[in-house]
Amino acid sequence: MTESMRRSGEYAYEGPDGTYARQHVHSAPANPEWPPPPPHEPAAATVRAPGTAPAHGPARRRGRGPVGLLAAVAIVAAAVGGGTAYAFQELTGKDTVASAGATTTVVPSSKRGDVAAIASAVSPSVVEVRATLSNGSSTGSGVIITSGGEIVTNNHVVSGASSIKVRTSNGTSYTADVVGTDSSKDLALIKLRGASGLTAAALGDSSAVQVGDPVVAIGSPEGLTGTVTSGIVSALDRDVTVSTDENQGQNQGQGGDGRWPFQFGGREFNGDTGSSTTTYKALQTDASLNPGNSGGALIDASGRVIGINSAMYSSSSQASSSSDAGSVGLGFAIPVDTVKSDLAKLRAGSTG
């Protein structure tokens, strides 16, 4: 024991293993024991042999690692419902989002605007729709919205159909049934029989679309499944008028040539729309749309569907053959926000 220790009242005792323990007291104990128990807690909590871990005591606080941080953020995201999947996607860098049992795919941020990447991601979600009618057949497109085979298309594609066949991008064919229709918005919901594990499209936000935004269109013009074209959004809120009379639609182009009559700017295109019509607000695009694109997807730079292609201006609108009715860069699509707001009605089996 040193002189300084004596002056401070601090005593040191040598233990069996050669180590020392110090205790600050006013007088040294007559018969010190090893280890000297402090007056306020058991000796085991203050003295231990070198290289041994304490038997009891507070746990050491661990730093928060990446796994802990991810779990914490995921829990917070769960509290805001639909934001969970998106938050997990952003943290992990994966580009698949689980939503209501469907797998939706978007392009990585590094590939945003890349037409090839968009086509690769979304093409599996776009199908060819063939409807058998009383006077022929109709060919259009559709967009898968659930892995179980719910598909959104145009009402005029399936209106009056006695049977519907759908072919996916990998060539698989299904029989489909009409779940609900809304002629006032030119929308229909059909469901594939016996389908599962399909890739559903990610539905975007058409209210955020701006004129000049790049877009990609995918559909089955002339029966050419999976045809991809690109362009920009040319205008917003265009008034497009289509027929709500299924017989009128069949008579004016659903006999196999795929040209759908509609009105725009006070003019009729692709035939007479008849007296029973409806008008909806549409996105205008210069992406090339041709007969058979109806019901297909209009997609933004991130790979999310922002519209359902529904009408196209043809320079030869009165031509007798669809091959003479090529696109001149004036196409129209029903905004996806309209589709989303109409889904409950369509799923309920509306036939309006």
Image (cartoon, rainbow, N blue to C red):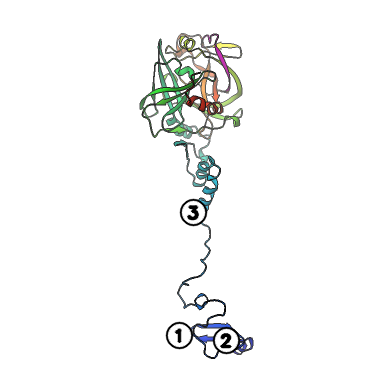
Q: In the depicted view, which residue is nearer to us: 153 or 303?
A: 153
Q: Earlier in the sequence, mark 1 or mark 2?
A: 2
Residue 12 percent location from the top left of the image: 55, 86
Q: Is residue 171 left or right of residue 272?
A: left
Q: Which residues, given as a range, are shown in magenta?
A: 270-282
The answer to whether any part of residue 151 appears in the image is: yes
Q: Which mark is residue 67?
A: 3
Earlier along the polypeptide chain: callout 3 or callout 1? 1
> Of the residues shown, which amino acid type is indicated by label 3?
Val
Q: Amino acid at mark 2?
A: Tyr
Residue in the foreground of this view, choosing between 268 and 74: 74
The spot of residue 235 in percent (x, y) is: 61, 23
Q: Are marks 1 and 2 in contact (CB under 8 Å)?
A: no
Q: Which residue is denoted by mark 1 in the rendering?
A: 16
| SS at mark 1 in the image | loop
Q: Can residue 224 be seen?
A: no
Q: Separation of disc 1 and disc 2 at Cα?
A: 17 Å
Along the viewing direction, whichever of 262 and 280 lies nearer the viewer: 280
- Count neighbours of disc 3 (C-alpha within 10 A) and say few if under 14, some if 14 to 19, many if 20 or more: few
**Residue 54 position in % (x across, y down):** 48, 72
- Residue at position x 49%, y 16% in the image: 326
Look at the picture and state if 308 lies above or below 14: above
For residue 280, side relative to residue 19 (left or right): right
Badge 1: few (under 14), some or many (20 or more) residues near its Cα, within 10 Å?
Answer: few
Q: Amino acid at mark 1?
A: Pro
Marks 2 and 3: CB-CB under 8 Å? no
Q: What distance separates the C-alpha of mark 3 from that of mark 1?
A: 44 Å
129 on left or right of 42: left
- Which label sits in the foreground, 2 or 3? 2
- Residue holding disc 2: 11
Q: Is residue 213 above or below residue 185?
A: below
